Amino acid sequence: MTRPKGVILDIDGTILRSNQVIPGAGETIAELRRRGHPIVFITNALESPAEQADRLAKAGVVVSIDEIITAPQILEGYLRRNLPEAALYVISDPPLAERLELDFHISEDPEEIEVVIVSCDRNFDFHKLNIGFQALRRGAKFFAVNADAICPLPDGEIPDAGAVIGALQGCSKRQVDIVFGKPSRLIAEAALERLDKPAEECLIIGDSLDSDLAMGFAAGMTTVLVLSGVTQRRELAYARLQPDHVLGSISEIFPRSFSALSASRR
């Protein structure tokens, strides 16, 4: 009997659109479980695994907290292991900043700041830019929770962490030292460890060529693009990375042959 493949699932654009479940997603996840496929959900969103699990549950998709990996989790683990006493400056929407304040020293003094951390910040302004700039000029490390260019919302797209990164790079001439969310190898390694599977025995199913699929390609996973989120089919004509498989949505996984879907075309 063939060993069940590990399945890594993006959340936004793959399972949920805003807070509404994408038709057929819940049934597909249930069928994956029934067939014995270990599953992990990964997201660059700032909310905690508990908050993501609650969000999914309200949409009718029951997920264990232990099945969810978030980009902030990867960042926090790295900080605890490597920089537990460092002074941090956080440019982000509240969920991340509030959580980091519980366990780490937060500072707005460029002379003291050792790490500048950025993510999506809908209150980003010149004051924050200048503090980050001054700290980076003085040698602070430059970390990003994620590097997504845009964030899809129910009423349209808004700039995401990539816009904040671009502003800081533009004035400081510094590049980000580490990105912790997709497509980083760090979150890929965490997902594979949680699944207890090598990359070649796993699929990544997601809606973003630049984050989900790029992570899968780099790690050596089979990549499945769903067109229920940020990527349009016309973009594939000029995309640098071509997914192994393209589906309209996650609901199209079954009744397809899952063994065929699990095979990479590369």
Image (tube, rainbow, N blue to C red):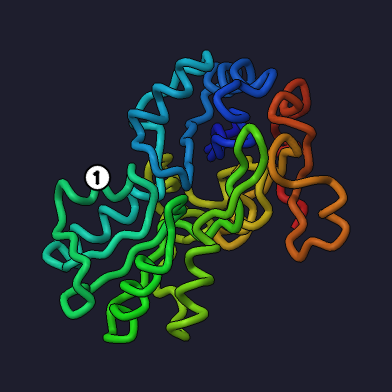
Find residue 160 and report its image quarter: bottom right
Residue 184 to residue 171: above or below: above
Decide if residue 260 is on the left or right side of residue 215.
right
Decide if residue 156 is on the left or right side of residue 234.
left
Decide if residue 112 is on the left or right side of residue 192.
left
Seen from the viewer's position, the closer of residues 262 and 163 is: 163
Q: Which residue is mark 1?
A: 99
Q: Position of residue 168 (x, y in %)?
A: 45, 74
Q: Amino acid at mark 1?
A: Arg
Q: Position of residue 188 (x, y in %)?
A: 47, 53
- In the image, what residue occupies the spot 47% across and 15% down? 58
Q: Quadrant of the N terminus?
A: top right
Residue 30 to residue 14: above or below: above
Decide if residue 222 is on the left or right side of residue 233.
left
Q: Could you say whether the residue bearing mark 1 is in a helix, strand or loop?
A: helix
- In the image, what residue occupies the spot 62% across and 42% down? 152
Label 1: how many residues lie within 10 Å, few (<14), some (14-19) or many (20+)? some
Seen from the viewer's position, the closer of residues 39 and 25 is: 25
